Image (cartoon, rainbow, N blue to C red):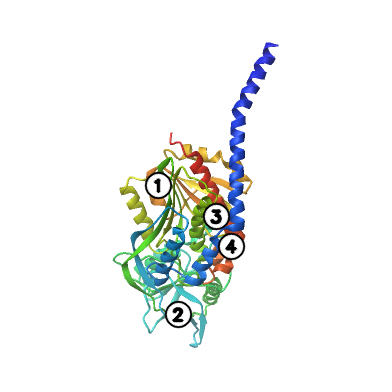
Amino acid sequence: MYHKSIISLFVLSLVLITLPLLGQNDEDARFIRSIHDHSLTDSKCYAWLTHLSEHIGGRLAGSPESEAAIRYTYEELLKIADTVYLQPCTVPYWSRGQKESVQIVNKAGQRQEIGGLALGNSISTGSAGIQGNIIEVHSLEEVRQLGKSNISGKIVFFNRPMDPTKIKTFQAYGGAGDQRVNGPAVAAEYGAIAAVVRSLTLQTDDVPHTGVTRYKEGIPKIPAIAISTMDADLLSTLLSEGQSPQIFIRTDCKMIDPDKASYNVIAEIRGSQFPEEIILVGGHLDSWDVGGGAHDDGAGCVHSMQVLETLRTLQYKPKRTLRCVLFMNEENGLGGGRAYAEASNQAGEYHMAAIESDAGGFTPRGFSFDGLEENFVHLFRQVVAWEPLLDTYMLDLDKGGSGADINPLKSQGGLLVGLRPDSQRYFDFHHTANDRIDAVNKRELQLGAAAMTSLVYLLDHYGLNQH
């Protein structure tokens, strides 16, 4: 009898402890449901993205289009935030100029025009163009091994494909990206006159992908272009068959202003209880010039704007300060991210969490989390407790990277978070002329905004205990 009483008391105590939590979870579930209902029926993110992509277009930092995007998003954020302001930053202004010409030239002098895009920050070939013999390589190390005797005076063709066996396509991108970012500089170090890079995509198609390249201090700069995967395969086949084609390149690109003034766009809803604790949501407002920057990264910008609009419409009063930051110059310099972190650190701010969306407007699959080694496990354990609330929306919580613009905030000791949409088709559009609004599914975009808003709600409502 005594034993049964002890068990009954234990069960009763569990019930008394659990009931408030169940009630709390029910309340959270209802509010997260309302977030999704609003996002899927009455959100503004798709209309915002349509304007950015189709009415403004490619928004490379320093360009007139980037300035138009700053004005547009500033005006839209005034409608939904307590405070909106522009934060100065310094950016490079690179211009593509006239359309590139890239030709494969056979031994008889016959020319075949193929598609190509100058890489961001590349120098021009000059109006006469450059023509030369090609040497195909598959790594930067191969260039070094070949040495000046084999590389000097030639056009280096970097042709390592993204690895299709990688399920996480960003890993495949990271595994091949050094060719584009650093390959031309390494080729120049060994005397190459130009560099041609296979586009970074898992598709086999005729669409070239641009992207940034970086030169080395003290090494002469050479022109650098990307060609499509189909054209890369064609060029490689011709070389392997011993046909010894040459390639002709003419580009008109140049750096117009290496130190141009620009701005991050920042909007806030001030917290009612803990205003010194900041929850940031953001994306980068700049994009490459050849498309509309819809997935990269207009989607991240409108996701972040929608977080504020949804919570304001649902009359949610945040405990902590919610800050939307549209960063400038992620694509070819990170001027906006660095300026933001520097100003924040100087002001002694604390970002309890910073969430970046820079992986497209596809169906959200979850979030990846990062932070300082000494407190990350403790913070992440608290977030994982919310997984049952997010599982309904098929959102997973994992350890991993966050984003280039928020990474400098890591030293503040909060959580850094990356929205992780389905990535299988992202690199079909990334840095291409096809990155326009018709590549974005409205519902998938809205679900991404709802996912970010849901996590922001939980972070704000419960906070994160540092110890």
- Looking at the figure, which quarter contains the C terminus? top left
Mark-to-mark CA distance, 1 and 2: 41 Å
Please tell me which residue is depicted at 52% across the width and 45% down the height of the picture. Answer: 457
Tell me which amino acid carries mark 2. Lys
The image quadrant that residue 95 belongs to is: bottom left
Residue type beneath disc 1? Lys
Q: Nearer the viewer, residue 221 or 456?
A: 456
Q: Distance of mark 2 from mark 3, alpha carbons?
A: 36 Å
Disc 3 target residue = 449
User: Which element carries disc 4, helix, strand or loop?
Assistant: loop
Closer to us: 462 or 216: 462
Residue for point 32% across, 70% down: 257
Q: Which mark is residue 410?
A: 1
Q: Amino acid at mark 4?
A: Arg
Regarding mark 3 in the picture, which secondary structure is present there? helix
Say which residue label 2 marks: 99
Q: Which circle, 2 or 3, is nearer the viewer? A: 3
Residue 142 in view:
no
Give the residue at the far top of this rendering: 2
Q: Nearer the viewer, residue 348 or 39?
A: 39
**Relative depth, front residue between 362 and 69:** 69
